[in-house]
Amino acid sequence: MAAYTAAGTSGAAGGTTRAVVTRTTLTLPAAALGPENPLPPLLPRDDPHRIGEELRATLPAEMARQIGYAPLTTVLPTRIRDGYTRDRTPTAVDALVIENDRLRATVLPGYGGRVHSLRHKPTDRELLYRNPVLQPADFALNGAWFSGGIEWNIGATGHTTLSCAPLHAAVLPAPDGGQMLRLWEWERLRDTPFQVDLWLPGGSDFLHVGVRIRNPHDTTVPVYWWSNTAVPETEHTRVLVPADEAWHFGYERDLRLIPTPRWGGEDRSYPLRGAFPADYFYEVPADARKWIAALDETGTGLVQTSTATLRGRKLFVWGAGPGGRRWQRWLTEPGTGGYAEIQAGLARTQLEHVPLPAGAEFSWLEAYGPLAADPAAVHDADWATARTEVERRLAEALPAATLDAAHAAWLPHADLDPAETLHVGSGWGALEVARGGHELPGTPFDPGTLGPEQRPWLDLLDTGRLPEPPAGAVPGPSLVSPAWRERLECAPGGPLTDYHLGVAQWHAGDRAQARRSWSRALAADPNPWALRCLAVADACDGDTASAAERFQRALALALALARADVAEPALAALAALAREAVPALLAAGRVEDARLAFDRLPAEVRATGRFRLLDSRILLAEGRRADARAVFDAGFEVADLREGDEILSDTWAAITEERLPERYEFRMRPA
């Protein structure tokens, strides 16, 4: 392995400039995230990335085993983020910049540490797809996500729950003596702390990214990681990777091994040569260098490479069909070019989770930078010729041995304590450190970050008792790990304690005990929150009549509380409950009650796109087809339409046999 050598000295004549980290503010058209959904997500979210057991049995053994390993049953303990709209206003957004004399990377610490921009200074070229707006959409595991840049996905199959959440950020010394930007947080789905260190060696054209995921527990944990990079997409964009086969996954939920790049009569290395959104997980040989590049008609663009631990490579395309193009426009603004995503992960596919033993860690180094190659070779019909050209150019720009040496040079810095805090994330990591006594050099979780959501749980740690809130208050977030469940089981009973205990028991799969806990909470304090949980349990058991009855009672209680408390949490809880209760009433055939419940909601709730759609569905159930059609004709937007959700096209098909209007065309698979 080559030794790593720092390049240049700051300010030296004719030399290179070491990287510096600075703060700045971007003003972007942004839709406010709004409040979190306060109802605990007891059920798995609609996940388009699942396959059936029959198909899994046909896959290679390692892949099949990791696809079946520890899939999520819920996104607890996180909450769903669905309180955003599509009303964008100019918004000041905190940003951190790391730059040397060659590259300038702009990072959004308040939005999952997203690399918003990566500009190559000598050519004044933006290497990423830089979304000009911040428009949340329902693509993350817990809802709100936005497109563009480089995102760090950890936790479980899908976009991380931290997509629109703040991370801790600090500046500290880089291996070459310049400055390094550290991002870190506690990932709550798997209880794994992680860090992302960004640095730019002096004179380097490549952003270096050191990633570490740690398991501080005494049992093995499942780990998921994919770095997703949005790149500009035109009809001439070609994505190249050292592979001859790929696992194709479409929204028909079919995973199959296909040749690459040509399949189905098309060269699929060009993202627009397909009608529907699709994933291509490449079979990169174990002994091959790990890289993926997106280059344009001139042979220039972005390349991503890494040390061997990050083995997987993937291309995601929206396709050239109407649904994919509609989604592209939905995620940005008119006149903005489209994008594809080139990605890198720990496993072959994103359907897999990888075991991380107790006390162990994963670490690797990624690099992102410009690449220029012979355009004739890049776009040669012979795949081997194109690949060889890109691999040769990458070896010239950043040899594999240099990257390995940089990784080795970074590892001692991974444990350095941050010198200067630049941004503060959540207090959940500090709470877990207080509970578990974890020693995590390099990623301190300061007790000063503990806030109102963590304080009741800190009281439970200190006193063995969970404090009861004022009557009628919307409960705070539930914690569901075995350690917290044990503490709840040992605590004195009470309406809030039993409510949270029921959520933890449900998450653990003990549904009978969860029902008992919620029933105790309800008996002690008639409240909509425990009643709603019991309604969900009824629905899961197939008892639609009892579910509808309980949902109706819960909604009536929530309406009364909302009238007395017009604060945001009460209204958010009411809207979230109504979204569940009204469909449950329709499913039970109680159409009149569904209409009555809908009409009693505050006007500002009924005016949102989600409830305009719900109104249309009630009108259909009432036999008022023309009125249901009129809702669509008047126009509405469901801001939190879920990835892969076909509720718009299904409702339209129930109204009329006419073609679905373009504004409602979001289908991601053949009709």
Image: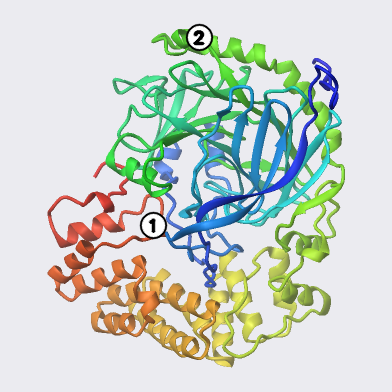
| Viewer can see residue 143 | no
Disc tally is 2
Q: Where residue 406 appears, x then y in whole percent? A: 78, 25
Q: Is residue 120 left or right of residue 82?
A: right
> Which element type, helix, strand or loop, lies under badge 2?
loop
View extreme (front): residue: 13
Give the number of the disc on residue 260: none
Residue shown at the point (24%, 69%) measured from the top left? 616
Residue that carries the numbered disc 2 in the rendered image: 374
Q: Is residue 434 left or right of residue 577?
A: right
In the rendered image, the vertical position of residue 501 relative to residue 42, given as above or below: below
**What amino acid type is highlighted by mark number 1?**
Leu
Quadrant containing the N terminus in the rendered view: top right
Q: Where residue 520 appears, x then y in whole percent? A: 58, 86
| Viewer can see residue 334 | yes
Residue contact at pointers 1 and 2, CB within 8 angstroms: no
Sequence order check, earlier mark of 1 and 2: 2
Q: Where residue 398 appears, x then y in whole percent? A: 68, 17
Residue shown at the point (63%, 81%) measured from the top left? 498
The residues tagged by marks 1 and 2 sit, at their Cα atoms, a distance apart of 42 Å
Quadrant containing the C terminus in the rendered view: top left
Residue shown at the point (45%, 29%) measured from the top left? 247
Residue shown at the point (22%, 67%) measured from the top left? 631
Q: Is residue 173 left or right of residue 618?
A: right
> Which element type, helix, strand or loop, lies under badge 1?
loop
Mark 2, Cα crowd under 10 Å, few <14 / some 14-19 / many 20+, is: some
In the rendered image, the vertical position of residue 458 relative to residue 8, given as above or below: below
Residue that carries the numbered disc 1 in the rendered image: 641
Residue depth check, mark 1 versus mark 2: number of the one nearer the observer: 2
Res 596 quadrant in image = bottom left
Mark 1, Cα crowd under 10 Å, few <14 / some 14-19 / many 20+, is: some
Q: Where residue 431 appears, x then y in whole percent? A: 77, 65
